[in-house]
Amino acid sequence: MSFSYLDANGVVLKIVIAAMVAFLFSEFIAIFPIFSNYEKHKTVVLKHIVPIWEITGTMIVFFVVELELIYSGIIPIASYLFIPVIGTFVVLLILRNVAIIYAEFIWKKVDSKPLMMFYSGATFLMVIGFVTAIAALLVGNSVSTAIPSLPPLLHINLANLSKSYIDYWALLTAPVYSAVYWEFLFGALFIAFGMSQVFYRTAKRTSYVPLLTIIFGLFLSVNAWNVVATLAGGKFIGDYMILPVIITLAVPLLYMYKPTTQFASYKPFWFLAMVIAVLFLELPITRIAGGAFPITVFASTNSMQIANFWLSIIGGIIFLLLMIMYAYVYNNGRFSFNPEKIEKAELDKSQKN
């Protein structure tokens, strides 16, 4: 049995990461309707969040297991490099889960707004931490090699891993590092704001705001990617970015067109589109630490890859079943692109009875 496909850019793990990012992103963008007008938007937000938040946690666990099975060599290093981010991420994950569980049980008796705002804020910080860690890995030491005046971000000591760490302060404040990081982060925030208006249907169908904010966010994020690739001695990976950009722009454009409005905000379609978009952004990444190490040097033994092969099949089937169940629950026990129409029909039926 050949597992050469695992060496081809780690496609399996990248699919899992893409799915995890898509789910986490869908909860991340909930911060905008929750904090802007919770009472007005809580019905549509909770209708998505309540059945999906546990699936997000499942995808995070799946990512950790896949990473261990495919690239076990990177786990000890990552445990030292990312301990501040991992520790904060886990604490926030537990607290946000507690918040939403309590909100689900007490909302009929007590105002759940503070709990949902805490849940949304915790998810927001989790995503910021995730983006920060990924930015540090991608930029790595190669930019400081190209610009010797910059301090290196990654300090890896393979002889003594306890001395390995990431200089997050340099990432946030040093010239070039910080410029790229903040540009990428704000680009992601603008994209998230536009997507939230479509995903949670908080914008009017004819509104240009989602499209314009997404275009501006794409401009910032794509430019940040280009700067990193150039400084690292590479070239602009535009061929890999074409499809993600097209997909990201297609969502608000479909939303503005009346016959496809409901399809654009149909959750299974949105998840599939985001998984494909994120996957294509990951495909050209075959090295980490700004090109210092090829991913394959951390690959596990063949026996672990065989275990991962079967885990991927089983996990993939479970993932698809969860998505089918989600679509069924979200649309009130039916499969439809127009949940509002179903709700109206059921409301009319109950009023007649």
Image (cartoon, helix red, strand yellow):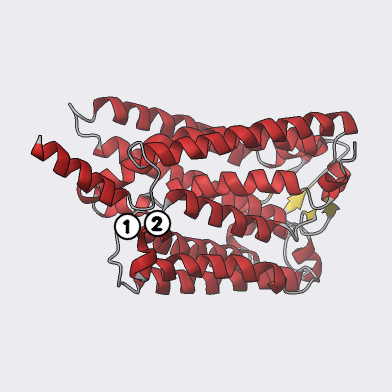
Q: Mark 2 highlights which residue?
A: 265
Residue at screen point 37% across, 36% down: 50
**In-front residue for pair 47/131:** 47
In the structure shown, which secondary structural element does the residue marked by tag 2 occupy? loop
Q: Position of residue 107 (x, y in %)?
A: 23, 30
In the structure shown, which secondary structural element does the residue marked by tag 1 occupy? loop
- Name the image quarter holding residue 221: bottom right
Residue at screen point 30% across, 63% down: 203
Q: Is residue 172 visible?
A: yes
Q: Are marks 1 and 2 in contact (CB under 8 Å)?
A: yes
Q: Is residue 196 above or below residue 333?
A: below
The span from disc 1 to disc 2 (Cα, nearest Å) is: 7 Å
Residue at screen point 70% across, 67% down: 240
76 on left or right of 38: right
Q: Which mark is residue 19?
A: none
Q: Position of residue 297 (x, y in %)?
A: 88, 45
Mark 1 surroundings: few (<14), some (14-19) or many (≥20) residues within 10 A: many
Q: Mark 1 highlights which residue?
A: 201
Residue at screen point 53% across, 61% down: 185
**In-front residue for pair 86/263:** 263
Q: Position of residue 196 (x, y in %)?
A: 39, 57
Amino acid under disc 2: Ser
Q: Is residue 162 visible?
A: no
Amino acid under disc 1: Arg
